[in-house]
Amino acid sequence: MKMPGLIQRCGGFLGNPSGSCPKSKLADIPKRGWPAVLGCCLWLTGVLCAQGRIAITVQTDEPGANISSTMWGVFFEDINFGTDGGLYAELVKNRSFEFPDPLMGWTTVRQAGASGTVEVRDADPFNQANPHYLRVNAADASAGFGISNEGFRGMGIRHGADYRFSAQVREVAGSALNLRLELIGSDGRTLAHGVLGGLGRSWQRRTAMLHASATDAKAHLNVLIEGQGTVDLDMVSLFPKDTWKNRPNGLRADLVQMLADLKPGFLRFPGGCIVEGRRLPLRYQWKKTIGPPADRELNINRWNDEFKHRPTPDYYQSFGLGFFEFFQLCEDVGAEPLPILNCGMACQFNSGEVVPLDQLGPYIQDALDLIEFANGPATTQWGARRAAMGHLQPFHLKLLGVGNEQWGLQYFERYALFAKALKAQHPEIKLVSAAGPAPGGDQFDLAWSRLRELKADIVDEHCYDLPAWFLDSTTRYDHYERSGPKVFMGEYAAQSVKTVSPENRNNWECALAEAAYMTGLERNADVVVMASYAPLFAHVDAWQWTPDLIWFDNLHVYGTPSYYVQQLFSLNRGDVILPSQLTGTPLTADRRPRFYATASRDRSSGDIILKMVNASTVPQVASVNLAGTLQINSTAKVIQLGAQHLADENSFDRPLLVSPSTKAVKLPGPRFDYVIPGSSLAIIRIKPH
Ligand code: AHR
């Protein structure tokens, strides 16, 4: 992975700092684009070294607060086709014919003049939870009548890969009928085919493996009857064989890999507003998401019709990726699970329905049962359900969210009842409570004062705002009370235009502002114990909300500049803060000191980790002093992230345009100068002797 060459040549060490320097004029250098800056840069190393400079003193002998292992995590929500059509590898949309329009995603196929009929039925279904199924009647024996599924904006099929077709099948009339299975490319070519015979007169799950001869991002699946007769079909499914860890009913391996590569400290699921539902009956209910996939009752996705400017009428939740799979995913990527449960309130941006306090019992019981499902022995009711799904050992749940983005008195009343019951039985579980949708204002202040009184464990703050908010808020937590509830910065993302604008871009300017902000989170690790960017995933053809951390289509995925910021902070977290002092930051044209730093130490490697963000547009010289008795190695590792332009974005064509580069450098000693390019993040890892 390469950084743009200019940046690599610009960033670097200058050697030992020289004596006193007059006030720097760095910040006044006009923005002239990178070629001009390179010219300056060479000049800078000779001249600015002799001018005033930023000084960072790190107290290597005086470790401060521990940095929580959960500091940098991920927020997962089924928005933007994040689950069905995304992480969940199922390729068939509306496989159970349970969408309100039961044939949504399906069309009839009449090859070679074949004729027949289809009918959606619910008499004598194979499964009561999802009772609808499709009756297909082929009127003649010309072997070409059947149905076709369009997938989620097509199906991503790869050359040489195997695909597992499965369906519940019942032959109703005729004899010796076959099902012919075809994967058809966007140009009409057959990419794979197979045949299923020996259909029985009662429901049977039948499977076939299809081997693809070509790649296509927009293929579709045909299921055709060979012979004259009638067949019932339900749970018509197609999965790549190569799912994450090759699990049946599994996840898209490339998307999970993106999560694993973040080494997230926690994984929050299933959202987001999806927890709340637009109305209470439509809320997310974890108990309906476990057990055999065919038994999981379909629900409308609350983002289906949320935004008039981004309607997604075919957005439903199959719950094929349910709570068991979420826990398993956490285990796979080494993240603490953080499930968020409905607290008896529907989304306050929608109906705002609330459950009366005296009827909250079942909601609280759901929370208690979830703890048992995750942690209880197999001899308990819910522990047995987990074990039956193949996980005898507990999932070691330690965190639980009560409500998503709630606000107002109705929330605190409900949270108090949850907390009382949960703490009585499970004092070991830390509860996450909500501070509403904004990081300030009356409702936010009220939340903090009430949640303090209620002795909340961790308070979830959310912020979607312009990059300037993030740059201006790096000292936000310097002023927080050090005792009482800890902070979870549970949803944040810089918005290039404004919140929920479809014009928002995942550009370097936003990522850089987030990096600056994250230095403030890390420096305040005694208060902030968790943070996650939101939302996580977006399908390029089916999104509702932008910006997002990771974009994908049916075959490819790329991380945004924000993804690489998250990754660098996570992989270079350190576990204890080293107090540092930053002085001499020049003001930029907007009269702000746009330079930020934080230092930590990783106990296992002993590395000192210095993170610096230069959000001014020009290179800055930082004079670093690693104060203390620590003897350091002369070789250090520098990881840099930057871009030629603040507007730069990654894309399918250039997925690594903004991505980190690493180099080894020689250190002159514990005091050194480092030139950090304009608009960039630099991380220096220094080994002790
Ligand atoms: O991240 C998108 C949405 O923003 C979340 O669902 C919600 O919690 C917040 O309002």
Image (cartoon, rainbow, N blue to C red):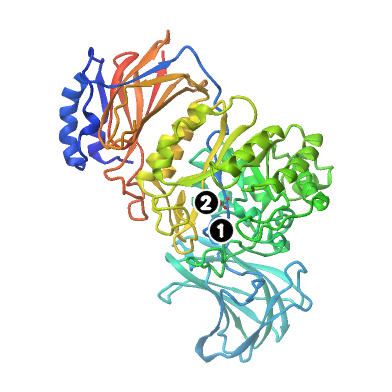
Do the residues bearing badges 2 and 1 touch, measured as CB atoms within 8 Å?
A: yes
Percent across and percent down for residue 91 are 55, 64
Dot placed on the residue nearer the N-terminal end, 2 or 1: 1
Give amino acid for label 1: Ala
Q: Residue at x 63, y 25 (%)?
A: 483
Q: Which numbered disc covers residue 287?
A: none
Percent across and percent down for residue 542 are 48, 63
CA distance separating discs 2 and 1: 8 Å
| Image-based side of 334 in relation to 626, left or right | right
Give amino acid for label 2: Ala
Q: Residue at x 48, y 26 (%)?
A: 523
- In the rendered image, which quarter is residue 526 located in? top right
The local secondary structure at tag 1 comes to loop
Residue positioned most to the front: 442
Q: Does 20 appear above or below 367?
A: above
According to the picture, the residue beneath numbered tag 1 turns out to be 89
Task: Name the quarter where the C terminus is drawn.
Answer: top left
Q: Nearer the viewer, residue 572 or 647?
A: 647
Q: How many marks?
A: 2
Percent across and percent down for residue 624 are 34, 19
Q: Residue at x 22, y 33 (%)?
A: 28
Residue 336, can we see it? no
- In the rendered image, which quarter is residue 396 located in? top right
Task: Name the quarter where the N terminus is drawn.
Answer: top left
Q: Nearer the viewer, residue 42 or 5?
A: 42
Q: Does 517 appear above or below 580?
A: below
According to the picture, the residue beneath numbered tag 2 turns out to be 253
Residue positioned most to the top: 629
Q: Is mark 1 within 8 Å of ligand 1?
A: no
